[in-house]
Amino acid sequence: MGVGGALSHLMHATLPVHLVEVLSLGALLRDTLLTTGTWLTVGLVGAGAALWLISAPWRQARPAPGFFARLLHSDFGFGWVNAGLVAGSQRLAAVFALSQTGQLNWNLVGVAVAFAVVLLAVLLGGAA
């Protein structure tokens, strides 16, 4: 497992059991750019983008043929499933709303603030 730069040194020093390799950021970038998986992923993303660009003239909405138009307008016959799920979700939300004291909202704020503080400390190098 390799992580580049100062984080690599920090992880190597604090996690000796995990055998973290110390790599420079340049070595990590070189290893990443020379990996077959990277180029395969870049190629697939590029092919998808090219197909999307090429298909632009054919992406315009067209009316559906008769049988499919009836299916589309009737939600393929599954509108009742959607309505049931929405109604059930709203009933469940109403039940849970009775148990909500408002404390959870402040807990989430506390988690978000703690995350921001830890992220700021790591970015400023306070963990060295």
Image: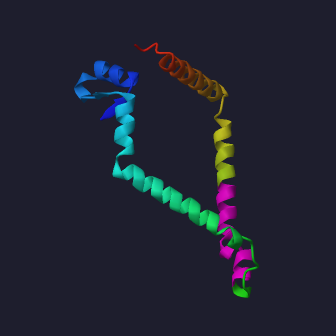
Can you tell which quarter of the image residue 102 is in? top right
Can you tell which quarter of the image residue 96 is in? top right
The magenta region covers 68-88
Judge left or right: residue 50 versus residue 86.
left
Front-most of 74 and 43?
A: 43
**Residue 75 coordinates in the image, percent (x, y):** 70, 72
**Residue 8 coordinates in the image, percent (x, y):** 35, 25
Q: Residue at x 37, y 42 (%)?
A: 32
Q: Residue at x 64, y 69 (%)?
A: 55
Quadrant where the C terminus is found in the figure: top left
Is 120 located above or below residue 62 in the figure?
above
Front-most of 48 and 120?
A: 48
Front-most of 10 and 30?
A: 30
Q: Residue at x 32, y 33 (%)?
A: 2
120 within the magenta span: no
Is 80 located above or below residue 3 in the figure?
below
Is 18 located above or below residue 33 in the figure?
above
**Residue 118 coordinates in the image, percent (x, y):** 50, 20
